[in-house]
Image (spheres, rainbow, N blue to C red):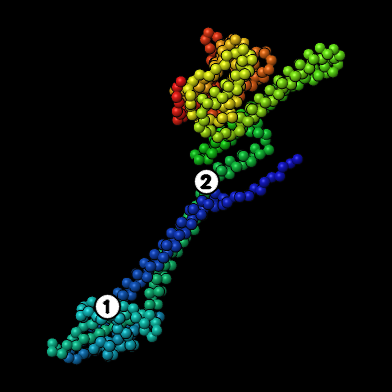
């Protein structure tokens, strides 16, 4: 039955290309908006300065046309001068001459004075904004004193321009400034989009190569080839290749394990079938009892093999390591095996520290010690001594089971941790006990090792990282 394919985009967010575009173009857009606001403010200031300069020149020119004579005024303001002031029909210009200030003498409109009191007259013009006929205007004002010392008088000259000119100048400046900037922004956006698309091409090729392997068998997955790629993509491809290599290696191990397990189970099951058939055909009670004893022995061996296979499978699951008193655990295991040791005529004892607290998993370490003691009691022989010890050695915690039995030859020592390897024909074993011990040691970040004892015997050690431990030596 074909399993349904999960949705391609379920739970996915924006694509990497869109995220990069947002990260690169959005700040540029914000900067352009801020730049546009600053440019508008600068254009307004420049336009205001231009208007102020023009108004200052006009108010001074108009003030020169009014000449004080004694206690009176001579106004020399020909029609030509008035036409010059009002030459721009699109820009409204108003002027007014008053003396005393506010009393109309000459002009084309009534202009308001400044909001605050003026300082004593000077040669500098004062500029301010004021509404004229309901419209905002920019006004330049210049005041001068005239008359005799006994009868001083003041003359005020005002010239005003509509702020529409300022708005028009600002608009023209903004258009001249922003038009090339907007063009550059568009070109920059196109270049950024093209650069991102080109930069993401290695990821597209990586996706294509991974997609091409979708229908391949896991054991046939070949490494990804990325000859020309940026450093980050090359590192990603290398990590994927390491993962594929680990998958192939793990699948090979599982396949080999399943083949070996099938072979090992086939032999005792075939023996059980044959012994059962012979028992059914047997008429002699003694012979039938002998056949049934062989069936029971084969069944026990098969059950032991299945238990060991299940133990190997459990070792593949992730475990959480926590501080554990391995010395107390080892003493408990030794006490559990003492009845069987006494029955077999073997002296089983414990040596080592009272307490030791490395990081470990109690169930797995108990399984490892059970396998070590089971092997020692099974192969050491009656009258031997088996010692379970826990001690520290440098940066390691050593859990050791030693016996003074016949031991193994130097040629057999390298094979003791191989699955289904047996050095003896003693019934009951299946060649998985020490392989399980090695797996448990690896799960704890350590290793298992076997050493020859002197003058004879065998020492199997479970070496674990010590970490921060506390021990009390006996």
Q: Is residue 258 visible?
A: yes
Q: Position of residue 150 (x, y in %)?
A: 13, 89
| Farthest residue, direction top | 455
Name the disc covering residue 199, or none: 2
How many numbered badges does the structure rendering display?
2
Q: Give the quarter of the image for residue 126.
A: bottom left
Front in this rendered view, residue 97 or 353: 353
Front in this rendered view, residue 134 or 304: 304
Residue indicated by mark 1: 126
Which residue does the image show at 66% across and 18% down from the upper left? 429
Quadrant containing the N terminus in the rendered view: top right
Where disc 2 sits, the SS reads helix
Question: Can you say whether 459 is above or below 363 in the image?
Answer: above
Q: Give the quarter of the image for residue 253.
A: top right
Q: Where is residue 171 in the image (x, y as percent from the top left)?
A: 42, 71
| Farthest residue, direction left | 150
From the viewer's perspective, tell me whether residue 455 is left or right of residue 48. right
Q: Position of residue 305 (x, y in %)?
A: 68, 23
From the viewer's perspective, tell me whether residue 92 is left or right of residue 361. left
Which residue does the image show at 45% across and 28% down from the upper left? 470
Q: Where is residue 335 in the image (x, y as percent from the top left)?
A: 58, 22
Which residue does the image show at 45% across and 26% down from the upper left? 471
Where disc 1 sits, the SS reads strand
Mark 2 and mark 1: Cα distance apart in space: 61 Å
Q: Give the quarter of the image for residue 319.
A: top right
Question: Can you say whether 416 is above or below 104 in the image?
Answer: above
């Amino acid at each position: 039955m074909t399993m349904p394919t999960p949705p391609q985009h379920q739970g996915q967010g924006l694509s990497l290309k869109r995220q990069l575009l947002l990260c690169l173009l959005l700040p540029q857009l914000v900067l352009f908006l801020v730049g546009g606001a600053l440019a508008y403010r600068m254009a307004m200031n420049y336009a205001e300065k231009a208007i102020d300069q023009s108004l200052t020149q006009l108010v001074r020119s108009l003030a020169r046309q009014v000449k004080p004579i004694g206690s009176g005024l001579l106004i020399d303001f020909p029609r030509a001068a008035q036409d010059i002031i009002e030459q721009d029909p699109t820009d409204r210009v108003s002027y007014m001459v008053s003396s005393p200030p506010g009393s109309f003498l000459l002009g084309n409109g009534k202009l308001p004075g400044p909001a605050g009191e003026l300082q004593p007259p000077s040669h500098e013009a004062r500029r301010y904004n004021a509404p004229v006929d309901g419209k905002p205007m920019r006004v330049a004002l210049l005041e001068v004193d005239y008359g005799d010392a006994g009868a001083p008088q003041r003359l005020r000259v005002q010239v005003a321009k509509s702020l529409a000119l300022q708005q028009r100048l600002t608009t023209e400046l903004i258009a001249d400034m922003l038009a090339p900037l907007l063009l550059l922004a568009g070109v920059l956006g196109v270049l950024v989009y093209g650069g991102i698309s080109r930069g993401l091409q290695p990821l597209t090729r990586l996706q294509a190569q991974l997609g091409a392997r979708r229908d391949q068998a896991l054991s046939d997955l070949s490494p990804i080839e990325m000859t020309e790629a940026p450093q980050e993509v090359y590192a990603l491809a290398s990590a994927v290749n390491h993962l594929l290599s680990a998958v192939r290696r793990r699948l090979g191990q599982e396949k080999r394990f399943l083949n070996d397990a099938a072979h090992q189970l086939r032999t005792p099951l075939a023996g059980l079938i044959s012994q059962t058939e012979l028992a059914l055909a047997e008429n002699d009670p003694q012979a039938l009892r002998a056949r049934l004893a062989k069936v029971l022995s084969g069944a026990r061996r098969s059950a032991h093999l299945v238990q060991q296979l299940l133990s190997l499978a459990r070792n593949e699951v992730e475990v959480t390591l926590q501080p554990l008193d391995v010395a107390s655990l080892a003493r408990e295991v030794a006490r559990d095996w003492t009845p069987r040791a006494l029955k077999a005529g073997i002296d089983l004892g414990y040596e080592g520290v009272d307490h030791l607290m490395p990081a470990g998993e109690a169930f797995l370490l108990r399984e490892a010690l059970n396998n070590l003691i089971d092997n020692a009691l099974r192969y050491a022989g009656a009258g031997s001594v088996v010692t379970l010890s826990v001690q520290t050695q440098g940066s390691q915690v050593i859990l050791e089971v030693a016996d003074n039995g016949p031991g193994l030859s130097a040629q057999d020592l390298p094979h003791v941790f191989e699955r289904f390897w047996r050095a003896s024909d003693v019934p009951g074993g299946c060649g998985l006990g020490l392989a399980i011990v090695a797996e448990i040691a690896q799960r704890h970040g350590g290793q298992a090792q076997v050493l020859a004892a002197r003058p004879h015997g065998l020492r199997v050690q479970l070496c674990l990282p010590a970490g921060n431990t506390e021990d009390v030596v006996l």
